[in-house]
Amino acid sequence: MNTADLGLPVDVPSTALFTDQYELTMLQAALKAGTAERRSVFEVFTRRLPDGRRYGVVAGTGRVLDAVENFRFDADVLGFLHERKIVDEDTLEWLASYRFGGDIWGYPEGEVYFPGSPIMRVEGTFAECVLLETVILSVLNHDSAIAAAASRMASAAGDRSLIEMGARRTHELAAVAAARAAYIGGFTTTSDLAAGFRYGIPTVGTSAHAFTLLHDRERDAFRAQVDSLGRGTTLLVDTYDVAEAVRTAVEIAGPELGAVRIDSGDLLLVAHRVRQQLDELGAADTKIVVTSDLDEYAIASLAAAPVDAYGVGTQLVTGSGHPTCSMVYKLVARAESADRRAPLLPVAKKSTGGKTSIGGRKWAARRLDEYGVAEAEVVGTGPVPSALAGQELLIELVKGGEVVAREPLDVPRERHAAARAGLPLSATQLSRGEPVIPTEYVPSRSGS
């Protein structure tokens, strides 16, 4: 059991209760009706991107795989369900031996997506697939929202470093997942030690204003920090007077001072003044780090400032105004009987109100123009057109219940950088707009 990789406390034995009650009541009813064992295909997609966003970022796939592996109904979980009378005894008996034995395909983590993209496809019996709906959506909606915000910030930052420092602005477990998603989206380090421990993300951090205020003089605080952490440390210089603090910092640490951090004020103006002062004091190699409620727009506004790194907290871990991606998990095909040989029939919700969906097991490919730049997201339910061969997006993640696509976190991070670079240049614009490429649907002539 790998609960640590999921970002869970080590005493959490199962992910099975990370679900909604109606998943279990649907299971009970389907078991009684004899339909629970029908082969089924569920897909995760979103009908639209958050307002103004040009592309989405797939993140959380690795955590989904951990969640599926840990989806077990142990004695404590079964006891809770029995005590609350959530489901009947026959259903409890079925749950006791639950192991997902189906297949999962999906966009590789770090890839970009668009409205209608079949980000993940879960195949198996209705019973084993329906139970995973809530936990899969919980992970993908959260992590993809953070990664999308991180990606926009990384585009705005250019080649400057980004520090994730939002742990104190969200739930303690969400903070770990957010740091992971931010790293995929282009952040370079995190302040959260749990994220460093669980996912190997580089960690950074030196001191806060409290450390300066603890000492009788700012000079004493700087001296204590340099003596402890070395001349390459980062000194926080805006507790009192910035200019005086910079002079003191260089006097104590010398030109080897690693960086100064500015956490308040007019960052554009202050950064220019501090850079000039550092250069005049002979500390030309000392870097400038800025923090203070930054988002992608604030980062972009500082493009002309002599800033070397940005620290981002609140806006990152809340998705910079879009904390979810509105992904859904829908049944798109099912067999007409429990017979394993029964053909799959496409199914879809047809109600009005903007919540319709398209039935059938889908593939997806990204069509490129003559310059190798993405020009359309193509989704279909029949054979993949020969012109799109080799450009399919979904990969096999789980086969027969066994995870087959684990990868180090640096792989989706690098994949995202490449995927973003393959989009039209307007993808990185921060102004509001439609998805940077359209989604085209190619229906099957013969069903699913």
Image (cartoon, rainbow, N blue to C red):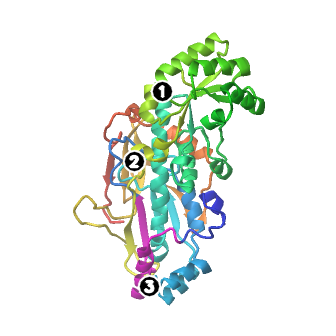
Q: Is residue 353 left or right of residue 87?
A: left
Which of 435/4 is in front? 4
Q: Nearer the viewer, mark 3 or mark 2?
A: 2
Tag 1, which secondary structure? loop
Q: What is the total number of numbered labels drawn onto the structure image?
A: 3
Res 390 seen here: no
Res 222 seen here: yes
Residue behind mark 3: 31
Q: In the image, is residue 83 part of the stretch drawn in magenta? A: no
Q: Please identify the quadrant where the C terminus is shown.
A: bottom left
Q: Position of residue 183 (x, y in %)?
A: 57, 43
Gap in Å between the C-alphas at discs 3 and 1? 63 Å
Which amino acid, mark 2? Answer: His
Tag 3, which secondary structure? helix
- Region rendered in magenta: 17-44
Residue behind mark 1: 265
Q: Please identify the quadrant where the N terminus is shown.
A: bottom right
Counting residues from the start of the chain, the first of labels 1 and 2 encountered is 1
Counting residues from the start of the chain, the first of labels 3 and 2 encountered is 3
The residue under the point 54% across, 80% down is 80
Q: Position of residue 63 (x, y in %)?
A: 56, 57
Residue behind mark 2: 322
Query: In this view, which residue lies farthest toward the front?
Result: 216
Which amino acid, mark 3? Answer: Leu
Which of 273/14 is in front? 273
